[in-house]
Image: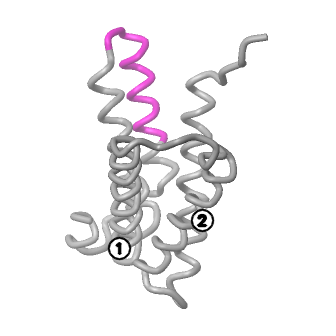
Amino acid sequence: MPAVRPPPEALFIAGGISQYLGAAIAIGLFDDIAPGGVALLRVLGAGLVLIGFRRSWRRSWSRQDLLWAGGFGAALALMNLFIYLAMDRLPLGNAVAIEFLGPIAVAAVGTRTLRSAGSLVLAASGVVILAGVQDEGTLLGVLF
């Protein structure tokens, strides 16, 4: 029996929930741990989950595989560091709304139909509404 794939909409919703939940947990840790430390904990935790889930030790890794995996891991680590630095300087809603601009921009580039364009407008509007975007924070927070 072939594997059942979840619909893209469900993945988008799950991604949004994951981003907001992770951000809310991270904000709570900033009083005790610097944003860089929180990012490190998140990346290490995610790495351990992936190692256990994918059982990557059961396959042999070529040099190229290791380089790609290392580059991807470094990109994720930097992404987490920058969003946590932004959340330390901006309201949570603003920081996560800015974080969602990347996936929305990718969707905009791939929009080919009127239905897709309408969905894109709804998604972007939903992010702004749910995020409760405020005119607060610092320019440095936006740049992160």
The N terminus lies in quadrant: top right
Apparent side of residue 40 relative to residue 8 in the rendered image (left or right) = left
- Alpha carbons under labels 2 and 1: distance apart: 19 Å
* Residue beneath disc 2: 45
Using a 10 Å C-alpha cutoff, classify the residue at mark 1 as few (fewer than 14 neighbours), some (14 to 19) or many (20 or more). many
19 vs 138, nearest the viewer: 19
Give above or below for 33 relative to 28.
below
- Earlier in the chain: of badge 2 and badge 1, it is 2
Query: Percent position (x, y) of residue 28?
Result: 58, 78
Q: Which of the colour schemes (rainbow, by chain, secondary structure, one colour) is used?
A: one colour
Using a 10 Å C-alpha cutoff, classify the residue at mark 2 as few (fewer than 14 neighbours), some (14 to 19) or many (20 or more). few
Q: Residue 48 occupies which quadrant of the picture?
A: bottom right
Give above or below for 114 relative to 68.
above
Q: Residue at x 56, y 58 (%)?
A: 47
* Residue beneath disc 1: 85
The C terminus lies in quadrant: bottom left
Q: Magenta: predominant secondary structure element? A: helix
Amino acid type for the residue under numbered disc 2:
Gly
| Discs 2/1, front | 2
113 vs 67, nearest the viewer: 67
Query: Percent position (x, y) of residue 45?
Result: 60, 65
Q: Residue 41 occupies which quadrant of the picture?
A: bottom right
Apparent side of residue 14 relative to residue 82 in the rendered image (left or right) = right
Query: Percent position (x, y) of residue 51?
Result: 62, 53
Q: Residue 46 occupies which quadrant of the picture?
A: bottom right
Q: Which residues are magenta?
A: 112-126
In magenta segment, residue 101? no
